[in-house]
Image (tube, coloured by chain):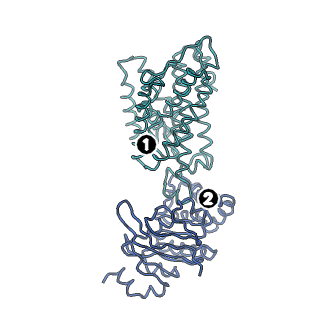
Amino acid sequence: MGALAFPAVFTLPFPRHVMIMIFLYGALATAWNIIAGYCGQIALGQAVFFGIGAYTSSLLYTRVGLTPWAGMIGGVILAVLVSQVVGYPVFRLRGHYFAIATIAVGEIVQALIINWDAIGGGRGVFLPIKRPDSFLNFQFHTSKAYYYYIALGLLLLALGITRWIEGSRRGYYFRAIREDQDAAAALGVNVAREKLRALAISAGLTAMGGSFWAQYLLFIDPESVFPLSLSILICLVAVLGGVGTLWGPLLGAAVLVPLQEGTRVMLGGTGKAIDLLIYGALIIVISVAQPGGLMGLFGVSRGAGSAR
Amino acid sequence: MTRLLEARGLDVLLGDYQVLWEARCAVAAGEIVALLGPNGAGKSTLMNSLSGLLRPRAGDVLFDGHAITGLPAHRRVSQGISHVLERRRLFPYLTVRQNVWLGAYAREARADRETQYQKMIELFPIISARANQLAHTLSGGEQQMVALARGLMSRPRLLMIDEPFLGLAPLIVEQLVEVIRRVNQDGVTILFIEQNVERALSIASRGYILESGRTILDGPSSELLHSAEVRRIFLGG
């Protein structure tokens, strides 16, 4: 309820922007949590799906004139397809090898997009500014409140899906794979298929985040939507908050995003890496003092989930 | 004697290293059979190949007369093969109940998992007593019981158990032997791995003996118990 009333109280753009970023990163980290926290596959290529979502909705809008809402769905479909094609071979790897392979995939995709002139190459894509505000065009220049509610909706969708997974059969298969892949296979769990399903859900949600981001900023390029640093940031947010828990990723975003936006405002371009320094310190403190993430402070850790 | 499971000429590699050389074994419906051999003989590798966790490079695995050599592990479970891995391998951060229920993943088993779960509680009262406890908090014996229950949830025709008695107190071992016999009497064929020859052959009606990746001997328990060859392998000399 408080979240719904926030824009009415905080009417300035900045606090609203910070909240939008918390919702966006909360959603992205929640999506990552499905494949990494519940299914145990430390995927570090989420930027691929984010970028696909950003590019698909933007290009369909600028080239075909399709509303970004439909473009968002197109991005989800494309991201899910790519996740299955890439996931099939990469899921044969385990542990660190899997994580490294996902980094490689992310780097390859970014290099491809930079050199793909037909979709803007390294220059990226500018979205034309359309006035007046229009829901269909996904553009609201008079107030950030619209973006706020859309981002909140995205976050709630990610949390809702996670909540549903937690209580469903599927969630148990995911966790069984995380805990012991061989034992799961010996019990008849189709490990390869369940991993692909977890990745598909994660990829689709991440693509929605990418579409939102593109329409929010109205400019995308390969450096901003396909970087490894984004994949890692998503992971850090979730790890800080607590992987394998419903609320952990959002909690991590609520701590890290204000830090990021705060240092950006206070220090400007010169302070670009300060937030990362603080992240690093936080991660060290957390991994020593509270390995389960911030959620551990509330006595919640990854594990049995809701069916206690 | 109808053969429920038969493996012939299995060559299995772990990486570049060949562990099994033309290994074989056969289990008839209703039997209890022991897989014996010293450390590193390839017993677990053979069992993993039977359950589909490993693919042999050469050889055949037949179940109920059909070749299942290339079938992935999860498909073998729905055919009626269940494999309880070495060291129990419970899901440590799931509860006992969740662990046991995960055994009923196969579509065929899902429909009557409720009745099967009740049966498991009857067989292992510990499951209802500890239902909501995380699996890693159980003792070794309790974990083995949960692992057996989990393996039985898919209502297998063949239950394969890798070292069920490893590191357990004699009293617990007796209980487990009792349970294994009861399960067998209910119509489940059993193949198990055990290091202790006398104990294994007192439970099983037949045994296979592996040494350095080859099946070198098999026969009824009474014969193996008095075999000079068995004495040589396990006692040296």
Amino acid type assigned to the residue bearing label 1 in the image: Pro
Q: Residues within 10 Å of mark 2 (few under 14, many from 20)?
A: many
Q: Residue at x 59, y 75 (%)?
A: B184
Q: Position of residue B154 (x, y in %)?
A: 61, 63
Q: Nearer the viewer, residue A49 or A296?
A: A49
Which element is circle 2 on? loop
Q: Position of residue A158 (x, y in %)?
A: 58, 35
Q: Position of residue B139 (x, y in %)?
A: 49, 62
Which residue, as the protein is rendered here, is positioned at the far left? B237
Is residue B168 visible in this depiction of the protein?
Answer: no
Q: Residue at x 60, y 24 (%)?
A: A68
In the shown orientation, is residue A292 left or right of residue A305? left
| Residue bearing the label numbered 1 | A291
| Residue bearing the label numbered 2 | B106
Q: Residue at x 58, y 14 (%)?
A: A11
Q: Which of the 4 quarters of the picture holds residue B38?
A: bottom left
The quadrant of the picture occupied by the C terminus of chain B is: bottom left
Q: Which of the 4 quarters of the picture holds residue B153?
A: bottom right
Q: Colour of chain B?
A: blue
Query: Which chain, by letter, is cyan?
Result: A
Q: Nearer the viewer, residue B143 or A236?
A: A236
Amino acid type assigned to the residue bearing label 2 in the image: Ala
Q: Residue at x 42, y 34 (%)?
A: A232
Q: Nearer the viewer, residue A265 or B106?
A: B106
